[in-house]
């Protein structure tokens, strides 16, 4: 595991997490892990406690899994078919009074972030994707017009990188990179 280079120690899940593509095609997601991942998302904060996140969960081999998989771009299909579950996150884009909820994407991203941390904390891996066709997903899953499909998250058990080939194998082994703090903090970074 290649730990993130940080100026000071951060939570080990955050330091060690990465988005792998090499997944064990035989691993089954235990119900307890799935429920924990969903609870982590459910307890995310949101503007006015609006909780605009909604989830469609496919378990490898079932109809929903295949419907979500079919909506992924081919690059993502090439590795995500080995995940234990594919979770499509969709957001309610209007408030209860019918006015637009401009913050729904932010809220849904927070819920997914918590989901990802809980997943890795449990020794599993999560890999988020926006490389999917939202219209195809809407059609395949009969997603209601009140919901906007946002992302798909592959949940699985990491497998040896050598399961992959070529550029995908290289990316799997490459160190994680980030902009320097000096580049992302416009004002107020401690010396
Ligand atoms: C919103 C979002 C969309 C992403 N879409 C894809 C995708 O379609 N396919 C893919 O292979 N990885 C996708 N990724 C993974 C990113 O490439 C990855 O998180 C980034 O390179 C940082 O690597 P790390 O997560 O291992 O630290 C996505 C990540 C996020 C957060």
Image (cartoon, rainbow, N blue to C red):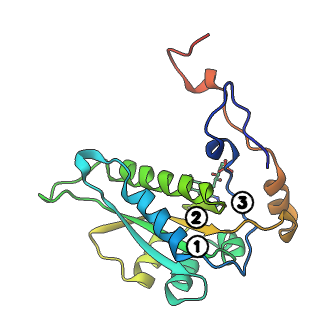
Q: Residue 87, relative to residue 65: is it above or below?
A: above
Residue placed under numbered mark 1 in the picture: 72
The mark nearer the N terminus, 2 or 3, is 3
**Hey, which quadrant is residue 26 in on the image?**
bottom right
Q: Which residue is mark 3?
A: 20
Residue shown at 54%/56% (left/top)? 118
In space, the residues marked 2 and 3 are separated at their CA atoms by: 15 Å
| Residue 119, picture quadrant | bottom right
Outermost residue toward the top in this view: 191
Q: Is mark 2 within 8 Å of ligand 1?
A: yes
Q: Residue at x 65, y 42 (%)?
A: 12
The residue depicted at 39 percent of the width and 48 percent of the height is 106
Closer to the chain start, of discs 2 and 1, is: 1
* Mark 3 within 8 Å of ligand 1, using the beta carbon: yes
Q: Position of residue 7 (x, y in %)?
A: 68, 24
- In front: label 2 or label 3: 3
Image quarter where the C terminus lies is: top right
Q: Which residue is mark 2?
A: 131
């Amino acid at each position: 595991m290649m730990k993130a280079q940080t100026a000071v120690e951060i939570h080990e899940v955050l330091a060690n997490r990465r988005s792998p593509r090499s997944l064990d095609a035989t691993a089954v997601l235990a119900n307890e892990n799935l429920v924990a991942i969903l609870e982590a998302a459910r307890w995310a904060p949101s503007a006015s406690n609006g909780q605009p996140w909604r989830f469609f969960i496919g378990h490898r081999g079932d109809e929903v899994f295949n419907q979500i998989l079919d909506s992924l771009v081919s690059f993502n299909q090439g590795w995500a078919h080995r995940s234990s579950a594919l979770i499509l996150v969709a957001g309610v884009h209007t408030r209860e009074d019918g006015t637009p909820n401009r913050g729904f994407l932010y809220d849904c991203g927070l819920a997914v972030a918590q989901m990802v941390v809980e997943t890795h904390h449990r020794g599993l891996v999560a890999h988020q994707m926006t490389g999917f066709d939202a219209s195809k997903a809407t059609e395949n899953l009969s997603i209601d017009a009140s919901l906007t499909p946002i992302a798909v998250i592959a949940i699985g058990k990491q497998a040896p990188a050598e399961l992959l080939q070529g550029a995908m194998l290289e990316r799997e082994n490459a160190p994680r990179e980030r902009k320097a703090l000096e580049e992302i903090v416009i004002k107020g970074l401690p010396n």
